[in-house]
């Protein structure tokens, strides 16, 4: 298998896992994932990313605190969320949402069911670990952009080691609670969480895959 074939295989196999087995990832595997992800490029080699990884009882404590915050506190992300979803962005978001709801048996119009499923974000989808991803505040949007490369590398390295992941922007919308729990200093922007572990392949939430835009929707060649 060529390098590009191997990369394409990992990219295709990676998906957002929304149900996990109760099986921890060995510390040396976590170390290898984070070390590999740290090879991501960054502007001026600033490498603005840092991660806090939970395991065992700490994951359970955080899961409880996060769910409580989501149910009782206002959203307050460090970086503003999207102003809106329009056009193709709206259509893709809706399609993804309905694929998930259909997979887990939530019918159209079932607001209680959709709200219940949304709260799974704050239960970390049952993952045994989560990685809280931060960037240096002083670097602003460009630090966040660089850290996006780290996040992708984290997910691909995990996939290569048989570990499933789900990047979660929803966790960052509870930034005050996350900051309190982990005592994250004010000079760090909380960008997202990546919950991870071993996939529960039999769970219906993992039974679908999202579509991808065609090359004609992505690429423009000039000249």
Image (cartoon, rainbow, N blue to C red):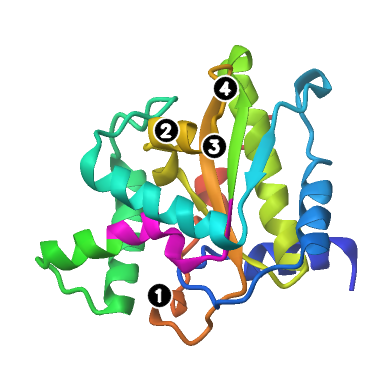
Q: Is residue 180 above or below residue 105?
A: above
Mark 3 / mark 1, whichever is N-terminal: 3
The CA span between labels 4 and 1 is: 35 Å
Q: Residues within 10 Å of mark 3 (few under 14, many from 20)?
A: few
Q: Identify the residue under disc 3.
A: 182
User: The N terminus appears in which quarter of the rendering?
Assistant: bottom right
Q: Is residue 154 above or below residue 78?
A: below
> Of residues 137 and 209, which is closer to you in this image?
137
The CA span between labels 1 and 2 is: 26 Å
Q: Is residue 126 magenta?
A: yes
Quadrant of the rendered image containing residue 79: top left
Seen as rendered, the residue at the extreme right is 2
The CA span between labels 2 and 3 is: 11 Å
- The residue mark sitting in front, 2 or 4, is 4
Q: Identify the residue under disc 1.
A: 205
Seen as rendered, the residue at the extreme bottom is 202
Image mark for residue 218? none
Quadrant of the rendered image containing residue 196: bottom right
> Of residues 75 and 37, which is closer to you in this image?
75
- The residue mark sitting in front, 2 or 3, is 3
| Magenta stretch, overall SS | helix
- The residue mark sitting in front, 4 or 1, is 4
Q: Identify the residue under disc 4.
A: 185
- Local secondary structure at mark 4: loop
Residues marked 1 and 2 touching at CB (< 8 Å): no
Question: Percent from the top left, x then y, of residue 202?
Answer: 48, 87
Left or right: where 184 falls relative to 70:
right
- Local secondary structure at mark 1: helix
Q: Identify the residue under disc 2.
A: 175
């Amino acid at each position: 298998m060529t390098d590009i074939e191997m990369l394409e295989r990992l990219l295709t196999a990676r998906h957002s896992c929304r149900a996990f087995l109760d099986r921890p990832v060995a510390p040396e595997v976590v170390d290898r994932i984070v070390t590999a992800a740290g090879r991501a490029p960054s502007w001026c080699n600033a490498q603005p990313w840092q991660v806090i990884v939970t395991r065992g009882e700490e994951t359970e404590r955080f899961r409880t605190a996060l769910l409580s915050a989501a149910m009782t506190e206002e959203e307050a992300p460090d970086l503003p969320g999207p102003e809106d979803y329009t056009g193709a962005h709206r259509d893709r978001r809706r399609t993804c949402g309905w694929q998930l709801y259909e997979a887990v048996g939530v019918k159209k119009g079932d607001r209680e069911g959709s709200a219940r499923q949304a709260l799974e974000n704050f239960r970390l989808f049952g993952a045994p670990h989560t990685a809280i991803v931060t960037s240096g505040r002083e670097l602003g949007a460009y630090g966040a952009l660089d850290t996006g490369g780290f996040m992708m590398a984290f997910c691909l390295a995990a996939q290569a080691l048989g570990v499933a992941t789900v990047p979660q922007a929803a966790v960052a919308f509870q930034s005050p609670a996350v900051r309190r729990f982990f005592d994250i200093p004010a000079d760090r922007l909380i960008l997202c969480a990546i919950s991870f572990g071993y996939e529960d392949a039999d769970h219906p939430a993992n039974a679908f895959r999202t579509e991808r835009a065609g090359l004609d929707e992505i690429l423009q060649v000039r000249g």
